[in-house]
Amino acid sequence: MKGMHRMNFDRLDLNLIKIFDSLYREKTLTRVAKIMGLSQPAISHSLAKLREFFDDPLFVREKNIMVPTAKAERIHGRMGRSLERLRHAVEDRGHSDPTRSSRAFMLGLTNYTGVVVLPRLLAALEQQAPMIRVFTRHAGAGQKADFLEEGSIDLAIGCSPINRSGLKQQRLFDDQEVCIAGRSTRVPEHAITPDNISRYSLIRLQVAQHETTDIFQHLDKEKIDIKTTFTTDQETLIPLIVAGSNHIGIVANKIARVYQKAFGFDIYPVRGLDTRFTARQYWHSRNDKDPVHQWFRRLVKTVCAQEGWSDESSKADHADII
């Protein structure tokens, strides 16, 4: 019997164990394929070999993720600690220089954070860690926590609060909503207020759950009449439309600054309403002590602190969200 078990083990390609462990952690074939630099059919073929070897489905699809079977849980439970020690041994070898890492990071972003953070982050990575690979997916206000928990993203950058145990966060920078208007649109008061907003044709931003501040919800609650001829759920479209029309729009200040030079519109403050909000990065506690993940989070924080984006007078220590 021992000889048979030894023969079976010798017959197992150890690369399949790495794929098994990665699929157990990442929960999707696509994610595993990207991380390992293989095609999705190659990962599917490897999974078929694992299923044949262990005589078990190992992972079954539920909704958008692959859920381990009871046997897969037992297998990973027995070998998981050994794999973790091996992983840390390999990562510790490059601990002093994570910039040489070839790690892949899946980021969960919104339209807002994709525009204001991602270009700066990629530029910094190109200079400091050119081998690190970055993938992105949209992670709205109601999605970030689920994506982090299921492991389909490594890090989320957004503005909506998350209240779920096991997740951590760090403040990155503050921003506020402003009004933008094309150069042909006169705003004599040089500001938009609840008293004068009804004079203008306003582009309305409407999404299921707002990442920043929901000015329109406040205006509706106060029964303030506003003239809207166009409604969109894409904040980054508003500057493009405003620049060539007589409409005004309400967008985040950093979005306005990014597009102002290219499209030539004016920026005015919004007064009489609290339009401030905070951008944060979020991650799962299982990645909290990972040295490469720690380095990546520090880089995100550093990038966002440039050019006065982060209020240095405010501490940004992360804390458990309970």
Image (cartoon, rainbow, N blue to C red):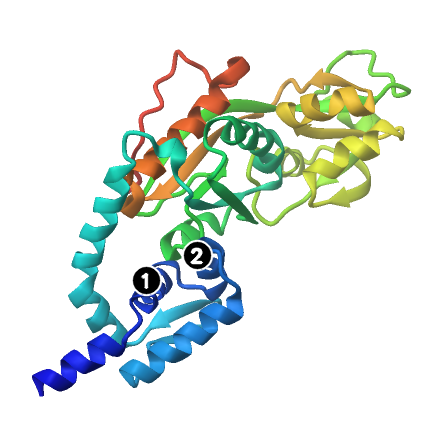
Q: Position of residue 279 (x, y in %)?
A: 49, 30
The secondary structure type at the circle numbered 2 is: helix
At 71% across and 32% down in the image, what residue appears? Answer: 224
State left or right for residue 284 relative to residue 63: left
Q: Are marks 2 and 1 in contact (CB under 8 Å)?
A: yes
Q: Position of residue 97 (x, y in %)?
A: 33, 30
Q: Quadrant of the C terminus?
A: top left
State left or right for residue 135 relative to residue 281: right
Give the crowd class for mark 2: few <14, some 14-19, many >=20 residues within 10 Å.
some
Q: Position of residue 302 (x, y in %)?
A: 44, 22
Kind of residue at disc 1: Lys
What residue did someone put label 1 on? 18
What residue did someone put label 2 on? 36
Is 119 located above or below residue 45 in the figure? above
Kindly report the distance in space between the C-alpha atoms of the residues bearing marks 2 and 1. Answer: 9 Å
Instruction: Name the quadrant containing residue 273.
Output: top right
